[in-house]
Amino acid sequence: MSTTRLKLSMSPFLQPDYTGHPDLLGPAFSFLIEHPSEKPILFDLAVRKDFDKLPSYPIFVQHKWEINVEKDIATILKDHGVDVDGGVIDAIIWSHHHWDHVGDPSTFPGTTELVVGPGFKDAYMPGYPQRENSTLLETDFEGRNVREVDFDKEGKGLKIGRFNALDYFGDGSFYLLDTPGHSVGHICGLARTSTSPDTFVFMGGDASHHGGEFRPTDYLPLPKELKPSPLRRRAGVCPGHLLQDIHPHGTANKPFYNVTKSFAHDKEVADWTIDGLGEFDAHENVLLLVAHDDAIVDPPQIDFYPEPLNDWHEKGVGEKVKWLFLGDFEAAVEANEKGEEAYSWGTYP
């Protein structure tokens, strides 16, 4: 749920550079989590409509980033009859502090709590202008309780996969996961979408930015045949070797991209977290959605708000979308078939 669309140069974030795919394209997801007996909560708010008010806006101009936002999340909810001003939304959970996730909390009343990850307050509060170098605004926090999650104390030793976890509602319906590395206090969400069978949507935030960072793996190797074909010129079935042939390591069990050191708060920890995403992603009952997954939205591959996402498994969405990100490498495949360069390594560490 969001109207955000972004176009940013890929090289500073992910390597290598694949021929014909110079940009990181995509949405910025916001999730509405509705509990049967509790107030709804939100996971991330995408980009605020008036993003030119952000302290970091001059950087957007400097790098010539293309950012389009039609509506704030609060406006989208109001358009669908949600009493935002009346305090219906209990909490906003920020995956982390970056501008393309925090939206505009001031469009929600002070009764709506703001939930953040470990170390967030010391690292990023107060906001601008009280803290001149802050990328956040004081208005994000004014009159609002900011709750910093303590996984050791609140989670009581719970782990899901390799990550420390917190059972948010106490009934196994929604979890927060401690997923550090990209930034201080980065957290992910894991929502149960059905019980027969048990299925989940993993809200990845910026733990990864592209499916090629955590696919393929030993747990989920590149198939010998891809169906549906991620390549537009290959209708029906696509031979997996066409993509393996452009892989920097020529393998079927290592991801296509590496996150750059300059883009991660702690690259070693970020790589550890990304490996953990791959473990979740290999489960057929988990739909892993990172915040900027362009393959999911253009054209739409899942049901978006106001439609529920609970029946994604029943509809076979997971199998359908798993390898669609490989469509980004179509030009690289064509170049390789012509004996030309399919990828190159930039100067980013």
Image: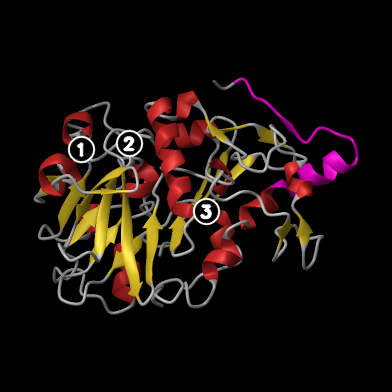
Q: Give the range drawn in magenta.
A: 329-347
Dots 2 and 1: beta carbons under 8 Å? yes
Instruction: Return the residue found at the far right.
Output: 338
x, y percentage for residue 141? 16, 46
In depth, the one of 43 and 140 nearer the eye is: 43
User: Dot 3: what SS?
Assistant: loop
Q: Quadrant of the N terminus?
A: bottom left
Question: In which quarter of the view is residue 119 placed?
Answer: top left
Q: What residue type is labelled 1?
A: Pro
x, y percentage for residue 122? 17, 30
Give the labeled residue for mark 1.
Answer: 118
Q: In this view, does 141 lie to the left or right of 79?
A: left
Give the labeled residue for mark 3.
Answer: 293
Sequence-wise, the earlier of marks 2 and 1 is 1
Give the labeled residue for mark 2.
Answer: 180
Instruction: Return the residue found at the far front.
Output: 218
Residue 324 makes an appearance in the image = yes
Q: Separation of disc 2 and disc 1 at Cα?
A: 9 Å
Q: Separation of disc 1 and disc 3 at Cα?
A: 25 Å
